[in-house]
Image (tube, rainbow, N blue to C red):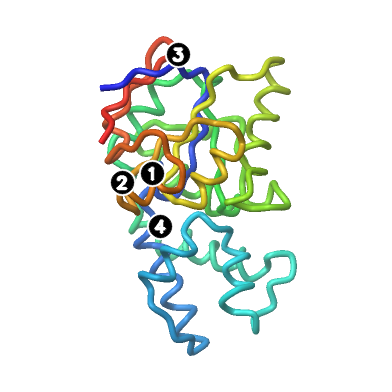
Amino acid sequence: MVSIPCDLCLFDLDGTLVLSTKAIEKGWESVFSEYNVNYNMEEFLQNNHGVRTGDSFDRWLPQIDNTNSKAGDEFEKRISIEYADLAEPVPGAPQLLNSIPKDHWLVVTSGTPLLANGWFSKVLAKFGVTKPEIFVTGQSVSNGKPHPEPYLKGLALWTEKYGKKPAHPIVFEDAPNGIKAGTASGCTVIGIASSFGKEVLQAAGATYVVQDLSHVKFHDNTLDIDNL
């Protein structure tokens, strides 16, 4: 067990708070089938996990009109309507979030507002978790992960709201792209091994790695981490 100071937790969403891979995989299977795209789903998810959906469309489906992330938005809307029942909380996520004061955590996700809000209203709300006031989505920034802008945006919004910079901000991430964004923003990163193994997360820059959020406890501006 490792204990570290923490006055602000910055959480990624997909794979960190919500296990959404099954839902997202179904969505991509449908799109790739519709446009006859040859793909390896495992390889695709590994390379695109933590990346904004619109950026994935630009790379993999350039034939689709994605002006202003139009295609990405429609894709995530479809997931939130048709496949939301396939998503569930990461073990320990509701308990951890409900134990942290509201002014001590925020969300930084690559997803659109529609999908991200859907995970809270359709998945986490069942466990008494409400959306935090500071909620950075893929549409809040010009550059998505692995660029540090999303986490820098979250830090700036928190500083503006509370009139001080966090002394010990900790990022929670499950994907290499997100971990790189977190470390580049100057934060310590805890990797969640829900999508990738310990070695991959450490290679991306995670200082600590846990199997899931049941291995993290918050109390008195301190995180107790059952490090793998």
Residue displayed at 68% across by 68% down = 70
Quarter containing the C terminus: top left
Q: Residues within 10 Å of mark 2 (few under 14, many from 20)?
A: some
Q: Quadrant of residue 84?
A: bottom left
Q: CA distance from mark 1 to mark 2?
A: 6 Å
Rendered image: mark on residue 221: 3
Which of 101/128 is in front? 101
In the image, residue 172 lies at what x, y percent? 45, 37
Q: Tell me if 50 is positioned left or right of 45 in this view.
A: right
Q: Secondary structure at mark 3?
A: loop
Secondary structure of residue under mark 2: helix
Q: Are marks 3 and 4 in contact (CB under 8 Å)?
A: no
Q: Residues within 10 Å of mark 4 (few under 14, many from 20)?
A: some
Query: Considering depth in this image, is 6 or 135 the residue closer to the camera?
Result: 6
Residue 112 location (% of width, % of height)? 60, 54
Tell which circle, 4 or 2, labels the residue nearer the N-terminal end. Answer: 4
Point out the tag, 3 or 4, that comes first from the N-terminus: 4
Task: Identify residue type, mark 4.
Answer: Ala
Q: Nearer the viewer, mark 1 or mark 3?
A: 1
| 128 sits to left or right of 137 | left
Q: Amino acid at mark 3?
A: Asn
Which label was assigned to residue 84? 4
* Image position of 217 with respect to 11: above or below: above
Task: Give coordinates of residue 30: x percent, y percent.
Answer: 44, 78
Most foreground residue, 163 or 187: 187
Around disc 1, counting alpha carbons within 10 Å, would you say few (fewer than 14), some (14 to 19), or many (20 or more)?
Answer: some
Front position among marks 3 and 4? 3
User: Would you name the residue on which mark 1 appears?
Assistant: 202
Callout in the foreground (4, 2): 2
Q: Nearer the viewer, mark 2 or mark 3?
A: 2
- Residue that carries the numbered disc 2 in the rendered image: 198
Name the amino acid, label 2.
Answer: Lys
